[in-house]
Amino acid sequence: MILALAGGVGGARLARGLAAVLPPEKLTIAVNTGDDFEHLGLLVCPDIDTVCYTLAGINNPAQGWGLDGESWAFMDALAALGGENWFNLGDRDLATHVLRTSLAGTHSLSHITAMLAGRMGIAHSIVPMSDDRVRTIVDTDEGELPFQLYFVRRRAEPIFRGIRFDGIAAARPSAGLLDAIDDPALDAIILCPSNPVLSIAPILALPGIRARLAERGVPIVAVSPFIGGRAIKGPAAKIMGEIGIATTPSGLASYYDGLLDGIVIDRTDADAVANGTALYVTDTLMHGGDDQKRLAAETLAFAYSLR
Amino acid sequence: MILALAGGVGGARLARGLAAVLPPEKLTIAVNTGDDFEHLGLLVCPDIDTVCYTLAGINNPAQGWGLDGESWAFMDALAALGGENWFNLGDRDLATHVLRTSLAGTHSLSHITAMLAGRMGIAHSIVPMSDDRVRTIVDTDEGELPFQLYFVRRRAEPIFRGIRFDGIAAARPSAGLLDAIDDPALDAIILCPSNPVLSIAPILALPGIRARLAERGVPIVAVSPFIGGRAIKGPAAKIMGEIGIATTPSGLASYYDGLLDGIVIDRTDADAVANGTALYVTDTLMHGGDDQKRLAAETLAFAYSLR
C-alpha cells in the first residue's frame, strides 16, 4: 500500500502515474487543502480539483489547471455584471464548485471529494489532508496575502518572506490520511513533485503528521519538482530562492530536515549529492501518460529498494 | 409616476413596454419574490431575473425565461456529477445567481437588484416586493410543494388546492415599493399581466400593502393575462380553474375583490362584463417590442382616463 502526498499540477501528474500502476485499494492520495478558498461564495479546492481532473483524464494538460475543452460564458457574464474575475472559473469547472459548496454545509470535504471523484470515474482514493479549514497565508513584501490573492491575483510577484497555515493547530488530519498512515500494509510514502513550501508543507504541518510519518518506519521518497535548479512549473524556485533554500537535491533534503529516505531527481542533476539521502536518477519531466506511469513505477521500485 | 406590479414573463413584457414609454424617474416596477428559492446553495430570483433580462433586452423571448443565446456547459457537467438538474441554470444566467448569492450575506436584495439591473444597462427602478424572505408554498393533491418544485419539477401538474406565502406575516415591503406608493406624484398602479394567484397575490399579501394601494386614491388597472379564457403562457388558467375562479374579466375582478378600477382585456373578450369595473378592449397579446410599447401606452391612457 502506498500513500502519496500531493498538491497541484506536478503532484497530480505523478499521482495519475501511481494510479496507473497500482490497483485502487493499494493507493491513497492525500491532497493539500491550504490553497482552498471561498470565492464568490463558492468553496474552491484547486489542488483537489487538479488531482481529480488529472486522474479522470479530463484536465487541460497544457494549462495545468481546469478542464480540457472548457468554455467561459459564465466568466464573460460575470465580468459584464462587474463581478470579481481575477480567478477563472470555467463553465464546467463551476459545476464542481457549486455542487461541493451546496454539500459543504452537511457533508465533510472527504465525503464530497469521494463522491465527486467517484462521479468522475476515479476508483482510487483521493482524500483531503483535513476536513477542517486550513488556509495558507503568505507573508510578502506587500504584507500578508491569502494564498490565492498572492498566487493568482498577484501572480506570485510579491517577494515571499514566509508562510503560515491559518487554522492548522486545530485541524485534524482526515480519517483517510490517518488510515493510510496506520495501514499495516503501508509500504512507502511518496511526496509528489509539488511545491514543497506551498503544497507539501501544509500536509506535514498538520498536528502530529510529520512525526507520525517519520516514525512509521517505511521509506519516505520525494520526487524532486526541480530540474537543474528550476521548477518545472509554477513559482517554487522563486519562492525557495526568496527564503534562501537551494533548489537542489541537497536543498530539498535540508528543507524536509531528515524526513526523506530518498529523492528521485532528474538526469540534469545527476552529479548532485544530498547529505547522505539516497538519490535515484531518471527523467522526471512528465510529458504525458507514459512518462507518468514510468516515473511512478521507477519511484515505487526505488522506494521498495530502500526498505 | 407609475407603479407597476409584476411577476414573470407576461409582467416583464408589459414592464418593458412601460419602460419604453416612461422616463426612468417616472416608473417603479415592484416584482414578486415568492418564487425565489435556494437551489444548489444559490439564491435564484426567477421573476426579478425575467424582468431584468427582459428590460435589458437580453432575454430569450421564445423560451420566456433565461437569456438569449445561452449555453449549457454547466448543466451538462452538473448532470455528469450527479447534481440536481431539474432546474435549468444557463452558463451566463449563473453569473447572476452566483453574484447575487455572494452579496446576499451583506447586502439587501433591493441593493443587489439595483446593482445588477444597473450593470445590465437598465435605468428604470426594479425593486423586489420585499427584502425579507417570502416563499410561495402550493397546496396540491400531492401535498404541499415549495413553488419551484410544483412549477418546474412537477410542471404544475398536481392539482392546485391553495397557496400560502411562507414568511409573509413578518415580511416588510421594500423601501422601493413603499416609496412608490407614497410618492405624491403617483398617478396610477398597473397590475401587469402576470399570474394573479402566483405573481400578483404575494405582493398584495405583504402586510398593509393591499389596503395601502386601495386607499391611495389613484386608479388601479390590471392588464388581463387571459384571452378567451386561456392564459397566454403558463398555468394560470389551470390553477384558477382548480380553485374555481373564472378566467374572465369578471372572474378577475372578483379575484381582486374590489381593488381594481379598470381591466385591460383582449378583443376576444370584448363582450365581457366585470361587475361594474371599467374595461378597456385592445389587443393584449404582445408579439414584440412594438406591441409592448403600444399596450403600455394604451394601458396608461386608460388609467389616466379613470382619474
Image (spheres, coloured by chain):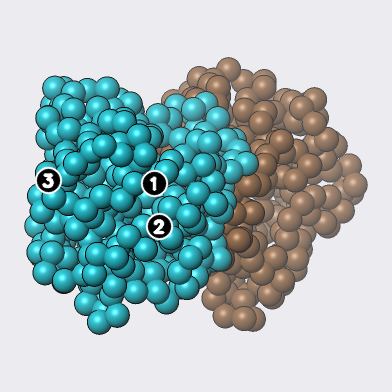
Chain colours: A cyan, B brown
Crowding near the residue tagged with mark 3, few <14, some 14–19, many ≥20 C-alpha atoms within 10 Å:
few
At label 2, the amino acid type is: Glu
**Residue occupied by mark 2:** A298
Rendered residue at 54%/62% (across/down): A120
Q: Is residue B305 visible?
A: no
Q: Which mark is residue A282?
A: 1
At label 1, the amino acid type is: Thr
Q: Which quarter of the picture shows residue A231?
A: top left
Q: Disc 2 versus disc 1: distance between alpha carbons? A: 8 Å
Residue A99 x %, y %: 47, 58
**Residue occupied by mark 3:** A275
Q: Which chain's residue wears label 2? A: A
Rendered residue at 62%/41% (across/down): A69
First in sequence: mark 3 vs mark 2: 3
First in sequence: mark 2 vs mark 1: 1
Rendered residue at 75%/38% (across/down): B61
Q: On the rendered structure, is B224 left or right of A245?
A: right
Q: Are marks 2 and 1 on the same chain?
A: yes
Q: Is residue A141 visible?
A: yes
